[in-house]
């Protein structure tokens, strides 16, 4: 009997692993089919605190991403393969501070430049899953100083003074995953959906849970026409954040450590037509640095997204 139970358990585990692999893991054959028959979409994302037209410019100060995806969809589900290039910039609480004026417990200067691939599956009931891998470099190799200095010079904004103190170079890889069990309709034009997310790597390692509420002309899948307002809340448990504590392998000591729990609130509007789409939102992120007070460490920034489907 114990042998039979073990055999049954092993068979169940192997079956579950097989289903998971078929449902989640990418394959070259599947990608070739999606690329050949799928719809091509370009997407640009911009995060920046300067978009709020305020004086402060610091912490997570900029994030720019561009990507292309191929989506094969029917009335029940959509399968997507895509790639993206991105750069994220982190600075002290005020970029006008000279190196000698930056407190030891302020946010370090850091840049993260990366390229990534991902596979995503969405179903009409809101169930979705996504698996991705980003590979890149944190440190001077990310070009953060050049990007921020030239952009601020172009926009006639104060130039950053502290990039000479930025974190040292480290190559990095971050594996990420997301899962949502589906949406629940609250009203005919209002729904709510939970989502679990996780990242693992030598740049970021964390896990989070979020809740998204949408209201308006809703779509069942991301590629469909829509026009709605949304509110998103997220709670993240942080194990490692190289933008705060330095690269995992280069043994760079900083005077700050990441907070173990970080909250985020986002409110915005999303519109999607047949070939074009756009969204704009305001994001409030709680303090990410253990040594800073919540009042000083909290962040506000705006997020813009532009979509073009061919």
Image: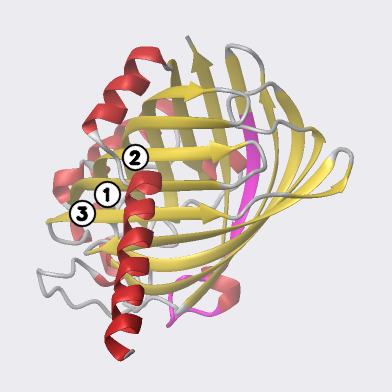
- Image height check: is 101 above or below 215? below
- How far is disc 1 from disc 3 in space, using C-alphas? 11 Å
Q: Earlier in the sequence, mark 1 or mark 3?
A: 1
x%, y% of residue 244? Answer: 32, 68
x%, y% of residue 292? Answer: 47, 79
290 is within the stretch colored magenta: yes
Answer whether residue 138 is visible to the viewer in this image.
Answer: yes
The circle drawn on residue 112 is: 1
The circle drawn on residue 173 is: 3
- Image height check: is 259 above or below 165? below
The circle drawn on residue 171 is: none
x%, y% of residue 159? Answer: 36, 42
| Closer to the camera in the image, 165 or 217 | 217
- How far is disc 3 from disc 2 in space, using C-alphas? 13 Å
| Residue at the image point whose x is 29% and y is 58% from the top | 109
- How far is disc 1 from disc 2 in space, using C-alphas? 18 Å
Q: Residue furthest bottom?
A: 2
Determine crowd level at label 2: few under 14, some 14-19, many 20+ residues with C-alpha closer than 10 A: many
Determine the secondary structure under disc 1: strand
| Residue at the image point whose x is 42% and y is 31% from the top | 80
Determine crowd level at label 1: few under 14, some 14-19, many 20+ residues with C-alpha closer than 10 A: many
- Image height check: is 283 above or below 2? above
x%, y% of residue 227? Answer: 75, 27
* Residue, disc 2: 118
Residue numbers of the magenta segment: 279-293
What is the count of numbered marks? 3
| Residue at the image point whose x is 65% and y is 41% from the top | 281
């Amino acid at each position: 009997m114990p042998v039979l139970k073990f055999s049954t358990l092993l068979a169940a585990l192997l079956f579950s692993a097989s289903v998971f692999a078929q449902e989640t893991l990418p394959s070259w054959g599947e990608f070739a089919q999606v690329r050949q028959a799928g719809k091509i979409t370009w997407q640009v994302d911009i995060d920046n605190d300067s978009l709020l037209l305020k004086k402060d410019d610091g912490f997570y100060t900029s994030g720019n991403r561009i990507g292309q995806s191929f989506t094969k969809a029917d009335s029940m589900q959509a399968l997507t393969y895509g790639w993206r290039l991105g750069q994220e910039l982190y600075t002290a609480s005020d970029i006008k501070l000279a190196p000698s004026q930056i407190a030891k417990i302020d946010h370090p200067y850091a840049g993260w430049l990366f390229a990534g691939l991902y596979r995503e599956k969405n179903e009409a009931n809101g169930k979705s899953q996504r698996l991705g891998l980003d590979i890149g470099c944190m440190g001077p190799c990310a070009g953060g100083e050049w990007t921020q200095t030239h952009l601020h010079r172009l926009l006639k904004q104060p130039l950053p003074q502290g990039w000479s103190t930025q974190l040292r170079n480290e190559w990095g890889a971050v594996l990420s995953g997301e899962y949502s069990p589906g949406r629940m309709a609250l009203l005919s034009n209002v729904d709510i959906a939970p989502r679990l997310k996780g990242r693992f790597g030598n740049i970021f390692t964390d896990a989070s849970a979020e809740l998204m509420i949408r209201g308006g002309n809703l779509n069942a899948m991301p590629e469909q026409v829509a026009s709605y307002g949304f509110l998103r809340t997220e709670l993240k448990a942080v194990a490692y954040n190289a933008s705060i504590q330095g690269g995992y392998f280069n043994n760079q000591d900083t005077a700050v450590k990441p907070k173990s729990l970080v909250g985020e609130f986002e409110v915005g509007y999303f519109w999607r037509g047949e070939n074009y789409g756009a969204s704009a939102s305001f994001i409030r992120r709680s303090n990410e640095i253990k040594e800073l007070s919540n009042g000083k460490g909290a962040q506000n920034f705006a997020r813009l997204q532009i979509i073009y489907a061919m």
